[in-house]
Structure formats: structure tokens, C-alpha cells
Amino acid sequence: MDLIDDVDAVDLAVGALVAGQRGALHAPANSVITSSLWDLERDVVLLEAARTQMVGEWVARGLHGLDGSRSPAARLARETGCSATAAKVVVRRARKLRTMPVTAAAFERGELSTDKVDELCRANGKKRQDRFAEAEERLVADAKRLCFADLQHVLAVWRDAADAEAADDAAQRDIDGSHFAAVRSYRGTIDLHGRLDPVRGAIVCGELERLEQHLWEQDWAETRATWGDDATVDKVARTPGQRRAAAVTLMAERSAAMAPGSTPARPLFTVIIDPATAERVCELSNGTVVGPGHLAPFISTADLERVVFGPGGRVLDVGRRSRFFRGGLRRAIEVRDRHCTFPGCREPAERCDVDHIVEWTDGGETTQANGRLRCGPHNRQRPGRRTPAPPDPIDDLDDEWPDPPPAAGCTPSVASDDPLDSRPDAGPPPDPGP
């Protein structure tokens, strides 16, 4: 068959699929629907790969300009009814992939999602093309095995290493571009707007999230006291947005209550010492990859802690006979995992418990090798545990993430002596968020 016949066959197959689904989805078993959905998702990727390849050839031949259109994206948006932004993404991807053979081949085989392909295309910037060509095979291999969030992290690290000068320039632009405004609006309300560089943003957001979690625990306790076992998230008095507004106000009230000359909480930079440190990587505790330039303004006022990783990314075990993960052992696991290790969950370390992989009651030891970060809901979703699932929704993914590599660089957080920082190993479910 020629190209026209191929496209016509696809049209017929899609038409038959849509017609066959009308009124028929209630009949198959749950397992059939699930497996069919994954097959269909893979087919969507394959179709998008074919579309991208065709758009690339269409652009390369200049066919978009035959009707006088000024750009490929303009005509694509007009002919298909998509937004100009979406059309530009397709055209940019099509052009990039013509210079990325390994990525294009994996895309055409359905081994990479469209979103992962777009992330790889962004990494292949003009000043990094030669470096990307050298690393493409390895980066594509990472893209195949990693979830999307982890791939973004890996590519961010690679971009900073591949173009250190650009990373330093970007860090300075972020710092110089920080601004904030509080504008009085209708009936005396205040509109807040601004932008912070990654380190200042992490400091502000970390404290905001900590206070919001405390307020959530209060709200949930009141809801449980009122409704008992029938308590659900929709019965909580305040919305997440209302709790965040209360947290911002609480931050201001605490600042006003500080005695003159009081020492504020200091940023905490964790310096990871292992072979990967030589790769010049800096990372915030929330997983954001930053350059050394982002950290420089805080060095004189920050606290530093040192964590030494031995062979295989292991830290010496602490408190082997302890029931709970505390002190240096807990901190080592927090630095290693950085977020909840349940597949697809990115709950930050400060809002996680350190969970025994092999249960303590089954003889599991309190060691680094037997510990991992789990957020409250996923910690309670262990086989054999009778604690009911919390009311907030849970991602249920089948594939386990690969073991995270040891972190390298600096992970800023905020050190505080506030009693709210002392939380039990298990508590109410985390704030469900917006």
C-alpha cells in the first residue's frame, strides 16, 4: 500500500473503534477494559509518532507555504483547529526529531511517550547539540525506564553539566528577576503576585507547606471529632486554598512576634560527598536542580551539614536496635530518597515517614538498607496492614521505580527549632492539596 492507502486504513480503523465503543463499554470485564486502555494508549503514541514524522517532511518540503501561510505552525493551527501553541509544539518536535535518530526510532516503536520525547527535544538546545548527540543513546535509555518526573530531573542535571556557563547565567537571571508585590484591590482585599528564585522559593514554600500541614491536621482532627468514622475530605471546614491563606497570615504573625535581634531560621545546605559530587550537581530538597550560582547568596548565612556516602551509595547504619528511624539514620534516608518512594508519588521528604521495607514485627532491622521514605497514605497501604486508606485519592501504579541513585551536590532546606517540626512517625493523612 502507498501512503494514501495507509492513512485511509487508519481512518477506517479509528472510525470502527469509535463506533464499536458506543454503548459497548459496559459489557467487558474490568481487566479487559484496563488492558485495552493500555493498548489504545500505545496506539495513540504510535499515531503521534507517525504524525510527527509526516509534519517533519511537510515542513522540510515547504508545503505549508503553498497557500501563502507565513509559518508551518500557523497553517497547522488553522487547518486542524488546534491552538497556535499546540501547533508550535508539534512543528518544533518534528524539526528536532529529524536530528535525533535514536529518539525518533524509539518514538516510532512506541517506547517513549510524547511528553518524554518533548522533554528530550528541549534538552537538545542549540548550544548543546553536539553534547546531546554524544549522550542521546544513554538519555533515551534513561527515558525508557524512568517515570516522567524522574526523567525531567535527569535531563535537568544533564543540561547543567553540559552547559555550565549557561546554567550560571540562568541562575543570576533568576536571582535578579526575583520580585514581589502586594496590591490593595477591591474592598480592601490584597492581591499577591511575584516570583522568587529557586532557593528563596524553596524556603518560602517549605515553611508555607509546613504550616499548611499543621492546619490540615487541626482541621482533620475537628472533622473526625464531629463525624467519626464517616469523616471525609469534603466535610473538612476549610479548603486547601483557605488553609494556605491562613498559613501566610500565620507566617506574618510569627514574624511580627519575633523579638528584636532574634536570629531567624537559617537555610540548611546538605553537602553530599561521594564520587558523583564531582559532576557539579546541586539540588534542592524538593528535587529542583539548581546551579551553584543559586546558592552563592546564602553561603554566609546558611548552616552546612555533611553526609558521606560509601561504596554503593550506603551510609553507615545508626541505631540498629531502635524501633524508629531517628537522628542521623533518618536524615541519611531523607537525603538518599528525597521524596516518597511509592511509584508516581513526589511527596517531599519532610512530609514522609521512614518505613521498614521488612516489617519490624517480622524481624526487619532499623537500618538504611531496610528503610525507605513513604508518605502517610502510602505508608498505610502496606499488605497486611489494617489501617483504612485515608480519604485523599491515591495513585495506584503497577510498575516500581528503579532504585534512586545517591544524591549529589547541595539540598537546601530550612532548619527550625519550632515545635511544629516534631511530628510522629504516623499521623493524619496529608493535606490533599488543591
Image (spheres, rainbow, N blue to C red):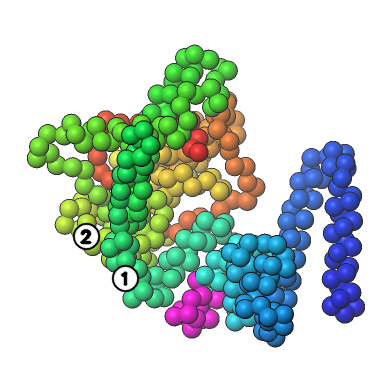
Left or right position of 311 against 303: right
Please name the residue that numbered disc 1 is placed on. Answer: 168
Please name the residue that numbered disc 2 is placed on. Answer: 297
Image quarter of residue 197:
bottom left
In percent of width and height, residue 230 lies at 58, 18
Give amino acid for label 1: Asp
Image quarter of residue 254:
top left
**Dot 2 or dot 1, earlier in sequence:** 1
Is-magenta flag for residue 125? yes
In percent of width and height, residue 314 lies at 39, 55
Per the image, label 2 sits on a secondary structure element best described as: helix
Q: Is there CB contact under 8 Å for labels 2 and 1?
A: no
In percent of width and height, residue 218 lies at 40, 24
Give amino acid for label 2: Pro
Q: Which residues are magenta?
A: 123-137
- For image coordinates 9% across by 40% down, the residue present is 261
Callout 2: 10 Å neighbours few (<14), some, many (20+)?
few
Residue 299 vs residue 172, the one in the foreground: 172
Mark 2–mark 1 Cα distance, whole angstroms, equals: 13 Å
- For image coordinates 40% across by 57% down, the residue present is 288
Residue 353 vs residue 195, the one in the foreground: 195
- For image coordinates 28% across by 45% down, the residue present is 414
Left or right position of 140 against 69: left
Left or right position of 206 against 357: left
